[in-house]
Amino acid sequence: MMEPIRIYLIYGYRLLTEAVACCLEARPEVAVAGVTQDLGEALERLAELAVDVVLIDASVARRQAVAMVAELAEKRPRLRLLPLGLESDDEVLAFLEAGASGYLMRRASFDELLATVAAVHRGEPPCSPQVAASVCARIVELAQARESRRRQPKAALTPRELEILALVAEGLRNKEIAGRLNITLATVKNHVHNVLDKLQVRNRRQAVQWAFDNLRLGRSAFAY
């Protein structure tokens, strides 16, 4: 016989908490390890108890529930966190981003609760096609934001460095840039080094590509 899934409940209303706990205790496949309405108490108790899945009532104060999931995910990463009472795909996405292992919508039945608990315990969070599409779209959005941040210079380019970059984009070599600006070759090399460092790129071609992507220069300006 398999060991029952050990569940800890964090609910907003005492009556609802006791009702859910009573229903769960009647099922042999699960065991209620504890119940609380307080996050601080939950963190203390979860450090002591052997728990597999934490049920979190998200129907009362959703912002606090999302923050609760994020804190539990950070401090107790091995726990499976299951928010209950969600109403929209946006809420599902918010909880998944915070670290939830799955979710249960507000209209779900008790049998669906048991099935979802079993699924997240196995490491197989249920996800509808619609939510899966939202998650994929969010992943793409986050990846694009990360790439955008990566492309941003770690420090602003000075007017002279922008001038050097524009000349590099025209295809001029260091010696030609020195002659154009009437500065020494060593000064040009120093400016180019600073441009590459600030843009966090490895070579002149990548610097030119950054300029094309971020300075709105026409393609005709790039001869490199």
Image (cartoon, helix red, strand yellow):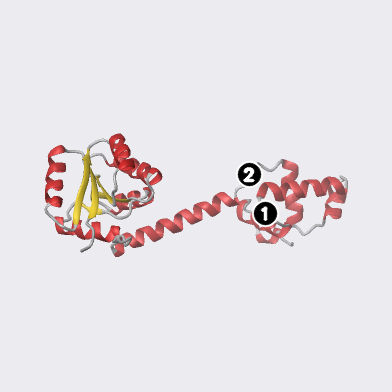
Callout 2 secondary element: loop
Instruction: Answer left or right for 113 relative to 136.
Output: left
The amino acid type, in three-letter code, at marker 2 is Lys
| Residue 87 visible at all | no
Q: Position of residue 125 (x, y in %)?
A: 31, 60
Q: For the point 85% across and 49% down, which residue is it?
A: 178
Q: At numbered mark 1, what does the secondary structure look like: helix, strand or loop?
A: loop
Count of marks overlaid on the render: 2
Q: Quadrant of the C terminus?
A: bottom right
Tell me if residue 43 comes above or below residue 165 in the rendering: above
Q: Is residue 40 visible?
A: yes
Q: Which mark is residue 154?
A: 2
Q: Nearer the viewer, residue 52 or 159?
A: 52
Q: Which residue is mark 1?
A: 201
Q: Is residue 86 left or right of residue 14?
A: right
Which tag, 1 or 2, sits closer to the chain's start?
A: 2
Q: Is 196 in front, or is 72? A: 72
Residue 26, given in percent of the width and then of the height, sits at 11, 53
